[in-house]
Amino acid sequence: MRNVFVSIINFNGRENTLACLDSIKKTNISDFKLNIVVIDNGSKEKLNLTQDYLGSIPLKIIVKEKNLGFTGGHNVGINYALSKNADYVLVLNNDVIVDPNLISQLIKTLDKNSRYAVASPKIYFAPGFEYHKDGYKQSEKGNVIWYAGGQMDWENVIARHRGVDEVDKGQYQQMEETDFATGACFLINREMLERVGFFDDKYFLYYEDSDLSQRIRRAGYKIIYAPDAVLWHRNAAAAGGSGSPLQDYYISRNRLLFGLRYASLRSKTALIKESIRLLVIGREWQKKGIRDFYLRRFGRGSYSV
């Protein structure tokens, strides 16, 4: 029987984490054993959960005194999972509600081909968390796509979600290879983690999923979008929303880190030119992020999280 570990980070998000765990309780478990590890990532508010919170599903809480970021927190969870003989690790945001068949559908996807290393589900906005929430009928909420596969725009070095803001009418219902798996949710097998490694802690937050995806694809394996596996995302619940200082800092810095590793020479040149321009006219935390990239201040960097 296969051993599946779910890695979840809690950072001052007790309400979201509990809602996520409550949805996991309803998971349909058939031919796999399910285990949950929650990394309490330097939170001010503690979870105070007992190990029997999920009933028969084993729950491990690992408390860290400081925030290790998305990368460091999940690396703790992944390392714990592998030490307990995990066959698969599900990296999962705490601000999601999962469908009962999510894990079984992702496993089924990876079982189809030995070159499939990662499976990522179809992700909807949770009702009321859409970018343009007033633009949808009440009957459409909960059916608005957040991620239906990822496309890397290499010319501009931007990771884009396919289908974002579209009402799902079955237009992305085909299983297929995708450019990157979103860190909000993906299932990865043990062999791939041992082959390419975990998240790169230089990123701390943002673009770490694109970096891991590139390492997997360059090793000759595939990342698969699995539309029959679904969940709902309370978008940006922990990041302050689009355009926040936190996003300005980490996206500006990490886009340079990612792009100068993997993009074409032409795109690298354009990135450097753009960074110089933003150092002059950019927002405060964009400037700090770019400055820290050139000063090689990675990990948490200058932003106080």
Image (tube, grey):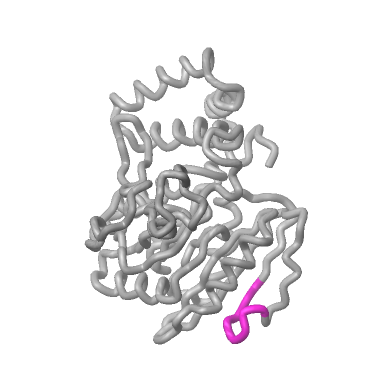
Along the viewing direction, whichever of 140 and 222 lies nearer the viewer: 140
Q: Is residue 294 left or right of residue 154?
A: right
Query: Residue at image x 42%, y 53%?
Result: 182
Along the viewing direction, whichever of 253 and 23 lies nearer the viewer: 23
Task: Give, as a single range, the part of the protein colored magenta.
Answer: 53-60
Q: Is residue 48 above or below residue 279?
A: below
Quadrant assignment for the N terminus: bottom left
Estimate the x, y position of residue 76 in percent, counting from the top left.
60, 61
In magenta stretch: residue 80: no
Q: Quadrant of residue 239?
A: top right
Estimate the x, y position of residue 13 in percent, counting from the top left.
66, 56
Q: Quadrant of residue 250?
A: top right
Count of marks placed on residues = 0
Query: Residue at image x 76%, y 62%?
Result: 46
In magenta stretch: residue 54: yes
Which SS type dominates the magenta stretch? Answer: loop
Along the viewing direction, whichever of 236 and 59 lies nearer the viewer: 236
Q: Quadrant of residue 272?
A: top left
Query: Residue at image x 26%, y 64%?
Result: 115
Q: Is residue 94 left or right of residue 180?
A: right
Estimate the x, y position of residue 123 in percent, counting from the top left.
40, 58
Query: Residue at image x 53%, y 42%?
Result: 203
Quadrant assignment for the C terminus: top right
Furthest residue toward top: 280
Q: Is residue 113 left or right of residue 119?
A: left
Estimate the x, y position of residue 304 in percent, counting from the top left.
70, 37
